[in-house]
């Protein structure tokens, strides 16, 4: 028998892309399909080095359309299949993932955001929030985890496979170029050793006949009438709304008496955390709120915060993509809103501290 | 007494009569395919993928695992499936627009990688599902909705030679042929060899089928038949181009 990829819990120091490959192995992913794009390339590089030792497969496709659609084929075969991309590749990935939404195909996609629009930079941004949450020609029947640290990248990549297979919605892990390329310490572990159950994938196609009878499966994405489509989408919407509360994740602290709450996600939330802690030491009444799931969005939780505080300060490496999601989620709230938007550029805690001080 | 038409066992009776227009070639290609699936006894092992185009109407055509994909994307879905479970016999069924235009990169690269799948492409010289626009396979001078004065090869080039292209970029193990619904016995033998070639693990198997689209051609039965039998072969040579089962010099 092949050994487990992660034998025992250990501290490691590695890049986020390497972390994704380890996490996918630890989650018992079977096959990766991918197309090169910076800053996600090393996910494939590590996967192709490690995966064969554990009987896992890889296919380099001709583009991201193919990477996405082959991933769907892999899932239909009943395998834990995944792909990874960024920027313009994420744009192409929206087509296959809209099919995954329509057919409820539990695919996993890792996104390492880079500058946009267009080719822009290969470095970093948080500009793929709108696209990753609602990029298809549909309703955004998908789950998006926004990670902030390498530990998150490991934890949520493992979780993404469980989430996808449990709820049968395509699931994204939304990282960025900093998380992809930076080295950082984290603990890697075998999820089952920690009592985390790994859901078994199930074949859609290629099932054995039972008592000599095979029930073939027919899945489609076109419908003949408006009503037919509406019925399907209504069912999906109900299911999505029903499971959303179980899926939603967020982190908040120091919000109870805060006059200003800094709202940020992903790697920027680390700067926000540092800033809030420092400001608190200096006696400023500041709080911290970070949505971990951007879709579904922790709407009620942010609304509760908004109802108690005076101002929300949105901080992001984009021109308000998080703020748009958040403000829609708390629609009707009379809370004040301030922004620190730096599209395609990192944000430091010093900048956030200075901004908060300027506000009070 | 009512006579029941002979239908392949692998056909799904609940979805018959099928949804193609009267006189459409799709139904004949799928009949030949159904008979081949029966003869090979692979109904329980087949996954059938259909494209967007009139092929989408086949999403519930067979009693086999079936996925209807996006326009041009059937080849990668079947590729991903085959890579993940090589025991499944994967069939990617598409139109000429799907295979030679929007999904041409997938066809080319699946062929170049010698993917162990069978691609069947229905050539009806137009984009039928969207109402009869020019396709890569539209004949020179042929009128379509987007070439109302006839296809001008100076402006839009000559009809894509699909099987010839696939044959040129594949190496050992690939099976490539062009059949026609005007010769169903031959088409059926090509489809059979294409599936056998996949099952033997040899490589990419590709069959283009010359087909009819009376609706968009705006032809009566006689002219429809004359077009597929006489006009199309002037540009599209019917025959086997590559067959690994036949050794050089044989
Ligand atoms: C991305 C995308 N672009 C365009 C279309 C519209 N469309 C649907 S079918 C079709 C043409 C189909 O032609 P072909 O592949 O030759 O199949 P046929 O209908 O002739 O059998 C087009 C362009 C689509 N569904 N998706
Ligand atoms: S439009 Fe043409 S190709 Fe489509 S079903 Fe009708 S005859 Fe067949
Ligand atoms: Mg066509």
Image (tube, coloured by chain):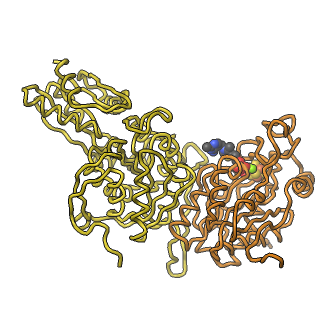
Chain colours: A yellow, B orange
Task: Judge left or right: residue A352 versus residue A64.
Answer: left
| Residue A156 position within the rendered picture, expressed as x and y whole percent measured from the top left | 30, 52
Q: Could you tell me which quadrant the C terminus of chain A lies in?
A: top left
Q: Left or right: B3 with respect to A106?
A: right
Q: Position of residue B50 (x, y in %)?
A: 64, 57
Question: Looking at the image, can residue B4 be seen?
Answer: no
Nearer-the-camera pick, A338 or A163 = A338
Query: Viewed as shown, does residue B201 lie left or right of B213?
Result: left
Q: Residue furthest bottom?
A: A211
* Location of residue B163 in the rendering, given as x and y in whole percent from the top left corner: 76, 59
Q: Residue at x 84, y 66 (%)?
A: B239
Residue A147 falls left or right of residue A234: left
Location of residue A175 with respect to A350 vertically, above or below: below
Where is residue A322? Give x, y as percent.
34, 33
Give the residue displayed 29% in from the left and 23% down from the top: A339
Residue at 19% from the left image edge and 18% from the top image edge: A359
Can you see residue A186? yes
Query: Where's the N terminus of chain A, which quadrant?
Result: bottom left
């Amino acid at each position: 028998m092949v050994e487990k990829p992660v034998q025992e819990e250990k501290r490691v120091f590695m890049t986020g892309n390497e972390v994704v490959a380890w996490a996918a192995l630890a989650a018992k992913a079977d096959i990766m399909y991918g197309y090169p794009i910076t800053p996600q390339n090393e996910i494939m590089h590590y996967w192709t080095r490690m995966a064969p030792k554990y009987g896992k497969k890889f296919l380099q496709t001709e583009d991201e359309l193919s990477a996405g659609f082959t991933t769907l084929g892999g899932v239909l075969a009943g395998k834990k299949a995944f792909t990874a991309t960024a920027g313009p590749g994420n744009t192409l990935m929206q087509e296959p993932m809209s099919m995954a939404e329509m057919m409820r195909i539990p695919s996993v996609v890792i996104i390492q955001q880079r500058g946009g629009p267009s080719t822009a930079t290969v470095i970093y941004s948080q500009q793929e929030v709108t696209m990753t949450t609602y990029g298809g020609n549909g309703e955004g029947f998908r789950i998006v985890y926004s990670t902030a640290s390498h530990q998150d990248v490991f934890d949520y990549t493992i979780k993404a496979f469980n989430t996808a297979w449990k709820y049968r919605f395509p699931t994204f892990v939304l990282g960025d170029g900093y998380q992809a390329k930076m080295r950082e310490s984290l603990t890697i572990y075998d999820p089952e050793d920690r009592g985390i159950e790994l859901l078994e994938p199930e074949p859609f196609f290629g099932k054995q006949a039972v008592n000599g009878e095979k029930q073939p499966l027919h899945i489609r994405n076109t419908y003949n009438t408006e009503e037919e489509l509406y019925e399907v989408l209504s069912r999906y919407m109900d299911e999505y709304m029903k499971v959303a509360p179980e899926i939603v994740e967020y982190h908040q602290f120091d919000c109870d008496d805060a006059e200003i709450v800094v709202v940020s996600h992903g790697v920027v939330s680390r700067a926000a955390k540092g800033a809030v802690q420092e400001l608190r030491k200096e006696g400023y009444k500041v709080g911290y709120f970070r949505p971990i799931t951007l879709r579904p969005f922790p709407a009620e939780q942010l609304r509760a915060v908004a109802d108690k505080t005076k101002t929300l300060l949105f901080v992001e490496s984009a021109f308000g993509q998080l703020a748009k999601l958040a403000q829609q989620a708390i629609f009707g709230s009379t809370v004040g809103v301030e922004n620190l938007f730096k599209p395609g550029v990192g944000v430091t805690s010093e900048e956030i501290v200075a901004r908060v001080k300027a506000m009070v | 007494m009512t006579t029941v038409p002979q239908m392949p066992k692998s056909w799904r009776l609940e979805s018959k009569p099928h949804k193609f227009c009267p006189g459409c070639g799709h139904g004949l290609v799928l009949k030949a395919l159904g008979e081949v699936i029966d003869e090979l006894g692979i109904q329980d092992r087949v996954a059938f993928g259909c494209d967007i185009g009139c092929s989408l109407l086949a999403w519930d055509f067979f009693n086999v695992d079936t996925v209807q994909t996006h326009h041009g994307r059937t080849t990668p879905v079947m590729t991903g499936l085959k890579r993940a479970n090589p025991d499944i016999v994967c069939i990617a069924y598409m139109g000429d627009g799907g295979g030679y235009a929007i999904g041409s990169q997938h066809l080319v690269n699946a062929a170049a990688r010698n993917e162990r799948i069978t691609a069947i492409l229905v050539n009806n010289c137009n984009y039928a599902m969207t109402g009869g626009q020019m396709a890569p396979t539209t004949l020179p001078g042929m009128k379509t909705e987007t070439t109302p004065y006839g296809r001008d090869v100076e402006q839009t080039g000559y009809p894509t030679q699909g099987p010839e292209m696939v044959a040129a970029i594949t190496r050992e193990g690939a099976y490539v042929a062009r059949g026609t619904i005007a010769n169903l016995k031959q088409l059926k033998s090509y489809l059979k060899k294409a599936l056998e070639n996949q099952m033997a693990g040899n490589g990419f198997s590709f069959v283009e089928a010359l087909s009819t689209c009376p609706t968009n051609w705006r032809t009566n039965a006689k002219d429809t038949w004359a077009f597929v039998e006489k006009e199309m072969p002037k540009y599209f040579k019917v025959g086997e181009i590559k067959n690994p089962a036949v050794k050089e010099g044989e």
